């Protein structure tokens, strides 16, 4: 099957990001035509003037709608798209020149109805963005689950860089109204429908992520809140590894307590781990500053996710609360 691609990009008050993304698309080296569907999700700061700049260089379909969240906006875009294969991107990514050629080559040889690709930090990103990228993608933190590991069994694509066939979209009815967490929820439902997923290691994007520590904390805290909800909906997918950030919080407190009583062994192990984080990030980016900031990024990531996970687990699995009522901020109304 030769895919006919439509990019699906929801945007909310981020015209500058759309500008960067479309610039990278102009530079892409790909022989066939493709469509770009941009869905303005109730933005007060419109991207229409940015889209207008590129209409003579790219085939863009631009839609504006009330704010219903990224998942529903992607569904809206896929319903409007003209292609038979959708590539879903976040507005804060930049594409390498060979991105679409790598996707096309993989699907022509190993067709799959849903796939995901890895993300990385571009050399132009700030030190903070590079530190956060390291924290979110390193084997030492996430174990490569976001696309850096080639032998991981079933791969769960993430919607910042995800492909979905029109057939699979119609069968699954697309994304749900939870956010974040709409991408693993869709993936699991696709598995239940008999569709397979795959990682395309060469389909890499440069992901700018959050631009402040506060925004990064809010993001990872929501990731933690969402996971027990997904485990309730899909209990067969629950894993011990989802507890690791929460266990890390407990280990940190235990290490500090034992150190007060003169037992330094556990705190030394804690220190060795973060020394490896520092060395890994410093060597990767050739920057001591990024190495130091990566330590802070990992601490924020583990604390934010672990705290959110414990809170959600308590309410959803112990008190048996209804997710949509207990955590209203995680759900969009259509």
Image (tube, rainbow, N blue to C red):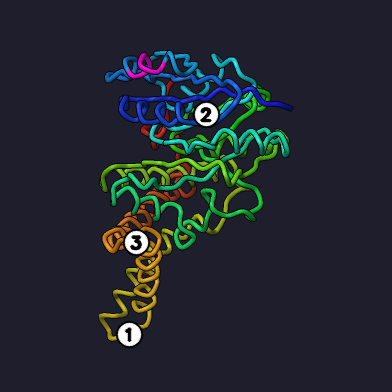
At 38% from the left and 20% from the top, the residue drawn is: 41
Label 3, on which residue? 286
List x then y, in percent, for residue 103.
61, 36
Q: Residues within 10 Å of mark 1 (few under 14, many from 20)?
A: few
Residue 305 versus residue 263 in the image, above or below: above
Prevalent SS, magenta region? helix
Tag 1 or tag 2, which sits nearer the N-term?
2
Left or right, residue 13 beside residue 312: left
Q: Which mark is residue 176?
A: 2
Q: Residue furthest bottom?
A: 262
Please report the residue visible at 55 percent of the width from the left and 37 percent of the height from the top: 185
First in sequence, mark 2 or 3: give its number: 2
Quadrant in which the C terminus appears: top left
The answer to which of 182 and 317 lies nearer the viewer is 182
Q: Magenta segment: does it hold 308?
A: no
Q: Looking at the rendered structure, which numbered label has been put on residue 263?
A: 1
Q: Secondary structure at mark 3?
A: loop
In 3D space, how far apart are the residues under numbered discs 2 and 1 (Cα atoms)?
A: 49 Å
């Amino acid at each position: 099957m030769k895919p006919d691609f439509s990019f699906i990009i929801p945007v909310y008050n981020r015209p500058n990001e759309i500008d960067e993304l479309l610039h990278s698309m102009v530079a892409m080296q790909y022989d066939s035509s493709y469509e770009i569907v941009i869905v303005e999700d109730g933005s007060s700061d419109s991207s229409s003037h940015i889209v207008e700049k590129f209409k003579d260089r790219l085939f863009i379909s631009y839609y504006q709608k009330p704010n219903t969240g990224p998942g529903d906006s992607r569904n809206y875009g896929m319903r409007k798209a003209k292609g038979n294969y959708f590539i879903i991107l976040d507005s804060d990514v930049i594409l390498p020149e060979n991105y679409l050629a790598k996707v096309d080559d993989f699907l022509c040889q190993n067709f799959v109805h849903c796939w995901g690709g890895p993300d990385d930090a571009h050399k132009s990103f700030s030190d903070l963005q590079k530190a956060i990228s390291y924290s979110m993608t390193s084997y030492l933190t996430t174990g490569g689950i976001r696309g850096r590991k080639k032998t991981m069994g079933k791969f769960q694509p993430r919607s910042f860089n995800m492909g979905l066939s029109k057939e699979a979209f119609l069968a699954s009815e697309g994304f749900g109204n939870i956010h974040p967490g709409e991408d693993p929820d869709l993936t699991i439902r696709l598995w239940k429908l008999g569709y397979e997923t795959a990682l395309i290691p060469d389909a890499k994007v440069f992901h700018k992520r959050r631009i402040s520590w506060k925004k990064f904390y809010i993001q990872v805290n929501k990731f933690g809140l969402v996971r027990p909800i997904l485990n309730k909906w899909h209990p067969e997918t629950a894993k011990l590894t989802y507890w690791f950030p929460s266990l890390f919080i407990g280990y940190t407190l235990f290490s500090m307590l034992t150190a007060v009583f003169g037992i330094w062994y556990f705190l030394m192990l804690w220190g060795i781990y973060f020394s490896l984080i520092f060395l890994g990030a410093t060597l990767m980016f050739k920057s001591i500053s990024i190495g130091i900031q990566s330590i802070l990024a990992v601490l924020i990531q583990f604390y934010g996710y672990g705290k959110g996970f414990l809170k959600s687990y308590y309410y959803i699995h112990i008190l048996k609360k209804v997710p949509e009522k207990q955590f209203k901020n995680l759900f969009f109304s259509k």
